[in-house]
């Protein structure tokens, strides 16, 4: 620590995906930007990637189990190459994504690997969360803000394609389809099939093909398969909802399509083959260079995406989008009027959901609808979440009461499940709003309501015990910072 108002943290991002495992190490510079006699306001003022690992094939045991010792050895080797020890890592994220998240031992493995990050977010990322991470990491969110466009980012990995829609930087929709480049594995630089995933068998049947492990595959047949996969990927956002191959392969609810898309981006392991003419797979050796059909899927997606009718933009990051999105965090400090019960604190790794683009609507019914929709989109089924809100339409008593009624109605399902109600406000009105909500909830339920904190969808927060006479709580905002739009 250089002085009382400035600090630097070393952060790591580790993504264990369907096909590849990657490590990113970054340096975050944090400064207190508040005045001497003001409530501290800590923000990241600089961010620098110090180390990008090689892109490794994820160690698996017969497609069913993650090889935890092999992954740990891989990570240890990368730390050594980067010149860091685990003790030097202050913060970070370890996530398992894509098809790998469904492996039988995924949750146990991620706990074993948690020591490779400091004060980390540890998650088996479901498709919705992974989509948001990838969309921030690819640059789609920042592009949406800069150009004031509605952008869809499709992160096409080894086993899944994850969609996230940003409207001026806000997440408005997500979806996932079971299409990826590693669903058919091939002998590297050869044509012999090594593995066919269940989703790929569905596509083969649609194409009138039967290809089993051990058989030799023809380029033309594999191209039929990847063309059909690409058609399904594009159909999710530009075709007929829920019908055909896309409907069979959907892993989440379909996109809502209650918005007009302007731009499409493709990130993930096959994205370079979508954008780079020189990377095209024109022979079997080129197709199978990585032991799967990923390069050919990229070729098929290039044509299908161009024919979608949307403007096609190239992302800032392709194969590293998710790991960059997940690997960096920031800090905040809460405001001075809060409504909390000290015994409930500290809280750690609480995911953030932001239901409103700006100030909350004045109509309680609209507040209810938007809160319910945001909770559904977020995909967090097994944990409490923090609702992030700029504030009421105005600071009058009536507006606060209307917002309290709308929030309470929108959180009915969470309340019935016995979940802790957590509200994070930008405006300085947490105490009044928190007390209003508490009066509307049956029974002696406790809530946590803090203010003067700016968070976004996909962030995680830690809320510490109150300090300075109980008027302020420290908040650690674990932000996917590399693609939060910069102010400059």
Image (tube, grey):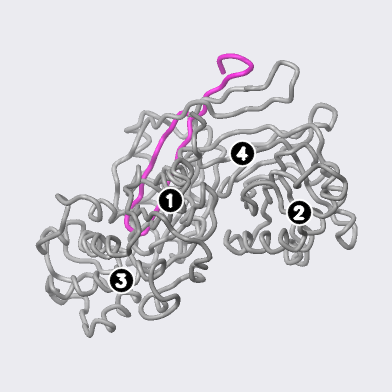
Characterize the local packing of mark 2: few (<14), some (14-19) or many (20 or more) Cα atoms within 10 angstroms: some
337 on left or right of 300: right
Q: Nearer the viewer, mark 2 or mark 1?
A: 2
The boundaries of the magenta stretch are 1-27
Query: Which residue is more in the foreground, 28 or 485?
Result: 485
Compared with residue 293, is residue 150 higher up or lower down, i.e. above or below? above
Between the C-alphas of marks 2 and 1, the distance is 33 Å
Q: Which residue is mark 1?
A: 134
Between the C-alphas of marks 3 and 2, the distance is 42 Å
Q: Secondary structure at mark 2?
A: loop
Characterize the local packing of mark 4: few (<14), some (14-19) or many (20 or more) Cα atoms within 10 angstroms: many
Across and down, in percent, residue 374 comes to: 62, 59
Between the C-alphas of marks 1 and 4, the distance is 19 Å
Query: Which residue is more in the foreground, 142 or 29?
Result: 142
Mark 1 or 3, nearer chain start: 1
Name the residue: 75% across, 55% down. Answer: 420
């Amino acid at each position: 620590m250089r002085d009382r108002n400035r600090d630097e943290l070393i952060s790591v991002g580790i993504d264990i995906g369907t096909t590849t495992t990657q490590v990113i190490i970054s340096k975050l510079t944090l400064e207190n930007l508040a005045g001497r006699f003001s409530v501290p306001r800590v923000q990241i003022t600089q961010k620098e990637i110090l180390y990008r690992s090689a892109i490794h094939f994820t160690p698996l045991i017969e497609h069913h189990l993650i090889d935890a010792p092999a992954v740990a050895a891989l990570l240890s080797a990368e730390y050594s190459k980067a010149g860091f020890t685990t003790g030097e890592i202050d913060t970070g994220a370890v996530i398992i994504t894509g098809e790998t998240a469904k492996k039988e031992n995924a949750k146990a493995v991620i706990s074993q690997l948690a020591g490779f990050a400091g004060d980390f977010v540890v998650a088996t990322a479901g498709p919705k969360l992974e989509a948001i991470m990838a969309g921030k990491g690819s640059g789609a969110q920042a592009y949406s803000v800069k150009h004031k466009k509605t952008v869809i980012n499709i992160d096409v990995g080894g086993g899944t394609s994850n969609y996230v829609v940003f409207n001026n930087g806000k997440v408005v929709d997500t979806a996932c389809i079971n299409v990826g480049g590693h669903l058919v594995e091939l002998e590297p630089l050869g044509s012999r099939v090594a593995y066919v995933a269940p989703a790929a068998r569905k596509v083969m049947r649609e194409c009138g093909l039967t290809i089993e492990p051990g058989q030799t595959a023809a380029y033309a047949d594999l191209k039929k398969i990847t063309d059909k996969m690409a058609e399904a990927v594009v159909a999710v956002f530009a075709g007929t909802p829920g019908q055909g191959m896309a409907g069979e392969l959907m892993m989440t609810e379909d996109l809502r399509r209650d918005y007009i898309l302007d731009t499409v981006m493709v990130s993930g392991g096959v994205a370079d083959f979508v954008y780079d003419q020189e990377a095209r797979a024109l022979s079997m050796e080129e197709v199978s260079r990585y032991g799967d059909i990923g390069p050919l899927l990229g070729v098929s997606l290039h044509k299908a995406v161009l024919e979608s009718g949307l403007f096609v933009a190239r992302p800032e990051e392709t194969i590293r989008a998710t790991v960059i999105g997940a690997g960096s965090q920031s800090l905040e400090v809460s405001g001075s009027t809060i409504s909390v019960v000290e015994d409930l604190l500290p809280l750690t790794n609480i995911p953030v959901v932001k239901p409103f683009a700006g100030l909350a609507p004045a109509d309680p019914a609209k507040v209810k609808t938007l809160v319910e929709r945001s909770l559904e989109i977020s995909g967090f089924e097994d944990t409490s979440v923090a609702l992030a809100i700029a504030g009421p339409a105005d600071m009058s008593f009536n507006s606060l009461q209307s917002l309290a009624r709308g929030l309470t109605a929108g959180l009915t399902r969470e309340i019935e499940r016995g979940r802790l109600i957590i509200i994070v406000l930008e405006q300085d009105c947490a105490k009044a709003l928190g007390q209003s909500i508490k009066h509307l909830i049956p029974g002696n339920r406790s809530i946590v309501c803090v203010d003067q904190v700016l968070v976004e969808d996909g962030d995680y927060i830690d809320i510490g015990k109150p300090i300075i006479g109980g008027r302020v709580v420290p908040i650690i905002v674990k932000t996917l910072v590399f693609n939060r739009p910069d102010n400059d």
